């Protein structure tokens, strides 16, 4: 090897000397471009879309001194609203993942998590009330000093609530409700014949 080649190789090795290694996070940050997702109208809508406003209505639905039909109606309305809001969050975030993963998106994620928690709370309470009522859908009323079987509440409202919740044992609950309806119908028919 000639002196020139050795000198050139030595110079090349010495001149490249300190190569700074960068982490994969730094490389990813450098290669990815910031999007304007957080300044979009969708992001503004999502920030406004909160589920904090349902707490007062949820406390009305939990009020055990209120009529059960009224409580079921409130739960049904609340359940639909939080389910709709949660679905809107999920839809927007699936269409534009940058809304969830960019710096500054904590407010959107916090609002979504709040709606998910509210939906879970409403569903749990709503299901608890439906199951409580379905345990005893028919009650005894006293007319003319005699016990008479009567519906605890409007069966259509209860049926609608069961359908809305779409529980795993929905068919069993609806069968139980149908049997309760037959009990009340049989008693009503007997009463009409006795008169």
Image (spheres, rainbow, N blue to C red):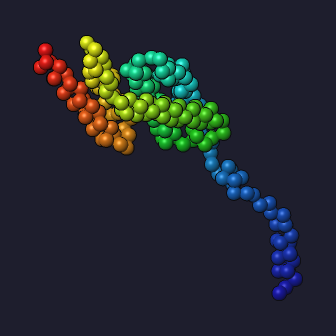
Front-most of residues 151 and 100: 151
- x, y percent for residue 47: 57, 28
Front-most of residues 57 and 140: 140
Which residue does the image show at 17% across and 19% down from the upper left? 191
Q: Which part of the image, by quadrant, shows the N terminus?
A: bottom right
Which residue does the image show at 80% across and 63% down from the upper left? 19
Which residue does the image show at 27% across and 24% down from the upper left? 149
- x, y percent for residue 185: 20, 26
Query: Is 138 on the left or on the right of 11, as rendered?
Result: left
Which residue does the image show at 64% across and 35% down from the upper left? 106
How many badges with numbers are in the image? 0
Front-most of residues 131 and 108: 131
Q: Which part of the image, by quadrant, shows the C terminus?
A: top left
Outermost residue to the top = 144
Vertical comparison of 178 with 145: above or below:
below
Vertical comparison of 131 with 153: above or below:
below
Determine the image quadrant of residue 128.
Answer: top left
Query: Is 40 on the left or on the right of 167, as rendered?
Result: right
Determine the image quadrant of residue 110.
Answer: top right
Task: Say whether residue 89 is visible.
Answer: no
Query: Is 167 on the left or on the right of 31, as rendered?
Result: left
- x, y percent for residue 179: 25, 34
Outermost residue to the front = 145
């Amino acid at each position: 090897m000639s002196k020139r080649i050795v000198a050139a190789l030595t110079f090349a090795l010495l001149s490249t000397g300190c190569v700074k290694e960068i982490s994969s996070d730094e490389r990813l940050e450098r290669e990815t471009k910031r999007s304007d997702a957080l300044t979009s109208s969708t992001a503004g809508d999502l920030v406004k879309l909160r589920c904090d406003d349902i707490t007062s209505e949820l406390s009305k639905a939990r009020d055990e001194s209120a009529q059960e039909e009224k409580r079921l109606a409130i739960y049904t309305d609340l359940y639909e609203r939080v389910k709709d809001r949660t679905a809107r969050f999920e839809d927007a975030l699936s269409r534009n993942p940058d809304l969830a993963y960019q710096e500054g998106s904590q407010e959107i994620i916090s609002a979504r998590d709040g709606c998910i928690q509210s939906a879970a709370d409403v569903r749990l309470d709503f299901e608890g009330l439906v199951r409580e009522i379905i345990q005893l859908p028919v009650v005894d009323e006293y007319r003319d000093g005699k016990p008479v079987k009567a519906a605890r509440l409007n069966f259509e409202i209860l049926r609608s609530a069961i359908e809305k919740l779409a529980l795993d044992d929905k068919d069993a609950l609806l069968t139980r409700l149908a049997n309760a309806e037959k009990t009340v119908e049989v008693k009503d028919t007997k009463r009409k014949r006795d008169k």
